[in-house]
Amino acid sequence: MFDESVMEKIIWPTTSVWFDETIELFNTMEETDTPSSIAKKIKDGIIFGDMKESTAKRKWGTINARYFGQGKEKVGALKYIFSSSISKQDKQNYAFVFFVEYENLFRIFLEEYIYKNFTELGQKIFTQRDLDNFLEYITTERKSDLPEKLQEHISDSSLKKVRNMLYKNIEAFGWGSAENSKLIVRRPSLTPEWFTFLLYYFFDDKVITKKEIYESRVMKRFLLNEYDIEYLLTGAKMKKYIEVSQLGDICNITKAKGDIVEYAKTY
């Protein structure tokens, strides 16, 4: 059931999504701001001025890790996107890309448990038993990848909190709803613009083969099968975000813009 081919240290989640706070920070900061200058603005009450300083610092610490830790160019691109007129759900979809890249327990849950059941078996409702099965795998087969203090003992209350957080945070991004201790997966409508962003975010080369995209683990975390990928690639091609060329058996995808920031400026 679980893919153990990629092992990494697991981040044990302790905080909420804080999407509105993330939007507020990105819309308040300047393009030239760095994590250090943002921290100073928070201390001076310029950002999150309506919060207690301790609360503001705690939220900034989480936002900094989830977003700013993934590179200046990606953060710059997200700032352009957050300042655009696209819908809240569309903005949540972009934030979700950053969130699951950092919060890897959610990513493992999506890639290694939900994906197969959702795309191959058509399962949309995940119960407490599903979560228990997943967390049992994490606490046994992946025990050595947990934070050191959790390798010795994980309380029932901690497991319950993480179980609820897995469901609630996926719901907070609009990718499902948590009802009566169940997660009902409802992947939102995804746009060619969002999918093209993935190509810039996860693939460094300007030219990518379609095979690389199909075989990427990245697609699993967003619950995309080959039909979904083909549909989104077709939409991106029609809007001229990418060019598609065939060389024998190899299908190449060429990005229209030079980098992720240049692409984001088109929003």
Image: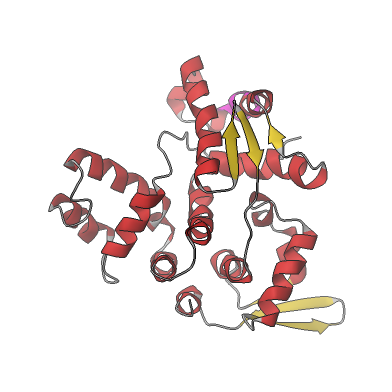
Rendered location of residue 25, percent (x, y)? 30, 57
Which image quadrant is residue 199 in?
A: bottom right
Residue pictured at 61% horizontal, 30% vertical? 142
Relative depth, front residue between 176 and 147: 176
In the picture, measured across the screen, residue 166 lies left or right of residue 3, that is: left
**Residue 137 image position (x, y, % from top left):** 65, 27
Answer yes or no: is residue 28 visible: yes
For the question of whether residue 7 can be seen, the reply is no
Secondary structure character of the magenta stretch overall: helix
> Residue at (56%, 35%) from the top-left corner?
167
Residue shown at 69%/58% (left/top)? 216
208 relative position to 175: left or right: right
The x, y position of residue 34, in whole percent, is: 27, 63
Q: Which range of residues does the magenta coloring cover?
A: 136-143
Is 188 drawn above or below residue 179 in the view shown?
below
**Magenta span contains residue 92:** no
